Amino acid sequence: MKSLVSDLSITCADAEPSNDNFKYEECDYPVLPLEEDEVLIRSTHLAIDPALRCRLNEDSGVDYMKAFEIGDTVAGFGGIGVVIKSSNKTLQKGDMVVSQFGWPWKLYFKTKPDTGVNLIKVDKAQCGDRPSLLLSVLGLTSGLTSYIGVTEKGNIKPGENQTFVVSGAAGACGSLAGQVSINIDVLQIAKLKGCGKVIGICGTDEKCNFLTKELGFDGAINYKTEIVKNSLLELCPDGVDIYFDNVGGEISNTVIRQMNKQSHVILCGQIAVYNKDLPYPPPIPEDVQKIISERGIKRDRFLVLNYPEKFDAALQELAEWVSQGKIKVHETITEGLENAGNAFVSLMKGGNIGKQIVFIPEK
């Protein structure tokens, strides 16, 4: 059995992750026969998520996932696989299954669906011949996070022509939370809920073109080549009403300084400071905190896991929008379990557009 093992996890605190933080190992095939209710799974897809960076610190900073120990097999968030053997009454050999939390980066593993990795049989009516959608637009850390973040924390008011800014805009969450189709009648999450203008912030000209020409954003800012403050003033002359914050750091400080009274920050992620050993959410400068207080800006931590009762309705609407062409989904696919660590390192350096996924083909 092959697995990707975290080799130098806690030494990564206060540093950029590198390929040396991961080790790919040949392991023994899972012991058979299976216990009652157990299934043997072969992984086919892995979701690669920025939040895993927190687990490479000595303290993850959150209570819903623990830090890795040196030598641990990496347990990511989402994954997809095929049932190879089963002693479970509801899952049969050949079934495709998905889980949104705790999927091990292994080629083969055993689990009990109700007490181990929570497996759900894939409904191909949702994803068709593209199962990776279950980890991107129909996944917990991408589609659900974007949809519920916008609808629960954005305070969008239809007809008020609000300005919506999203950082990390070409990533898995940002490209969905801020996406607008070129066809004015086919709108994404923010505009379907009532925003008048959507502006994305990202790190390359390629990503800016992707946002404006392919997804239909009203504008895009390359924070590496432009002065974000000046570009925001030009693109958002009436200020910012809603900010979907995926990055934190100085980019977010700059956006908040241009936000209007009674505006809203959807605090989704802080990838710009994940390589620093800081609490979550990380502290912000005094002047930014003063602005938040004086302008009555709402900035609450957002965690999608707090809204399980919203999942089914959100997934149904997201699936309908995809089938109707109202949402375009882009994924960056890396092939091979042995390259999962490389994919994570690339993700943390902005090498992806849309969801970063590892596909594990049969050999």
Image: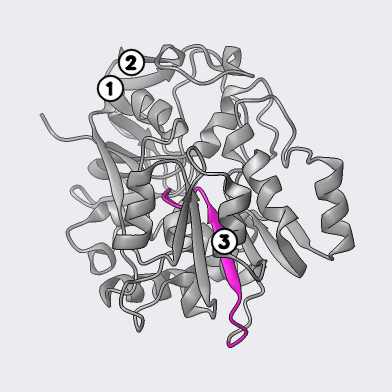
Indicate the secondary structure of the residue bearing disc 3: helix
Please state the extent of the stretch shown in magenta in the rendering: 159-172
Q: Is residue 89 visible?
A: no
The quadrant the C terminus occupies is top left
Q: Nearer the viewer, residue 45 or 352?
A: 352
Determine whether label 1 and label 2 are within 8 Å by CB: yes
Q: Earlier in the sequence, mark 2 or mark 3?
A: 2
**Extreme-left residue of the structure:** 363
Give the residue furthest to the bottom. Answer: 159
Residue 24: give its label: 2
Tag 3: amino acid: Glu
263 sits left or right of 40 in the view: right
| Residue 234: numbered disc | 3
| Three-letter amino acid code at the position of disc 2 | Tyr
Residue 114 painted magenta = no
Dot 2 crowding, Cα within 10 Å, few <14, some 14–19, many 20+: some
Q: Secondary structure at mark 1?
A: helix
Residue at 63%, 69% in the rendered image: 152
Residue 51 on image: x %, y %: 55, 38
**Which residue is found at the position 45% from the left and 41% from the top?**
203
Q: Residues within 10 Å of mark 1 (few under 14, many from 20)?
A: many
Relative side of 42 to 254, left or right? left
Residue visible at 44% across and 67% down in the picture: 218
Which residue is tagged 1? 338
Q: Quadrant of residue 300?
A: bottom right
- Label 2's element? strand
